[in-house]
Amino acid sequence: MKRIACFMAFALTCGLLLFCGLAAAADEPAKVAGKWELTLAPHGSYGPKTKTLTITQRGAKIKGTLGDDPLWGTVTGNNVCFYVNSKMPGGTPYTLQYCATVEGDSMKGTVGQVLHNAKARFTYYWTAKRAK
């Protein structure tokens, strides 16, 4: 009887350790560091637009560039969100928020302008493929 109780305690402990390990792995941020080719879907009278996305990653925090513009953001599980500051042709600054789901070597999501205390004026779709 004592042997069965010890075996059950051991099995329960192993099961809990396995479950905790799987739960921790599910929350681990996706690996997004590297170079990507980001394509904005066609919108309005504009065709698709492609830019180089370069990301460095430290845990859940990311930074890098989209074209010539700096970016910063976070990765939670397989979801990534980053912000890009840029300027309109007349020099007016603005911030864009890119959010996507990461699946291996691809990302798919939306981008919208960040406005304070207001809804974004637009939302476009984008995809990215990891560069070889």
Image (tube, rainbow, N blue to C red):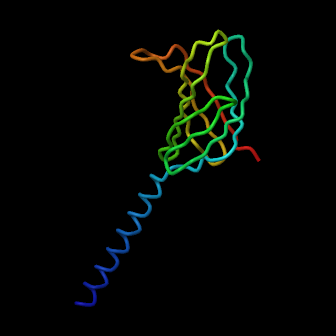
User: Which residue: 73% across, 23% down?
Assistant: 48
Q: Nearer the viewer, residue 113 or 103?
A: 113
Give the camera-side residue of 42 and 98. 98
Q: Residue furthest front?
A: 91
> In the picture shown, does residue 27 fall above or below 107?
below
Q: In terms of depth relative to the viewer, which is nearer, 92 or 33? A: 92
Q: Residue at x 42, y 64 (%)?
A: 21
Which quarter of the rendered picture does the N terminus lie within?
bottom left
- Image-quadrant location for residue 4: bottom left
Position of residue 26 in the picture relative to residue 48 (left or right):
left
Residue 39, horizontal then vertical, whole percent:
70, 30
**Side (left or right) of 10 relative to 45:** left
Q: Residue furthest left?
A: 1
**Rendered residue at 23%/90% (across/down):** 2
Above or below, comparing residue 27 to residue 114 in the picture: below
Q: Describe residue 28's horizontal placement relative to residue 57 as left or right.
A: left
Against 114, residue 65 (above or below) is below
So how many labels did they put on this image? 0
Q: Residue at x 54, y 34 (%)?
A: 82
Residue 55 at what x, y percent from top left? 62, 42
Residue 11 locus on image (x, y percent):
35, 77
* On screen, residue 126 above or below 7: above
Position of 68 compared to 30: left or right? right
Residue 114, horizontal then vertical, whole percent: 49, 21
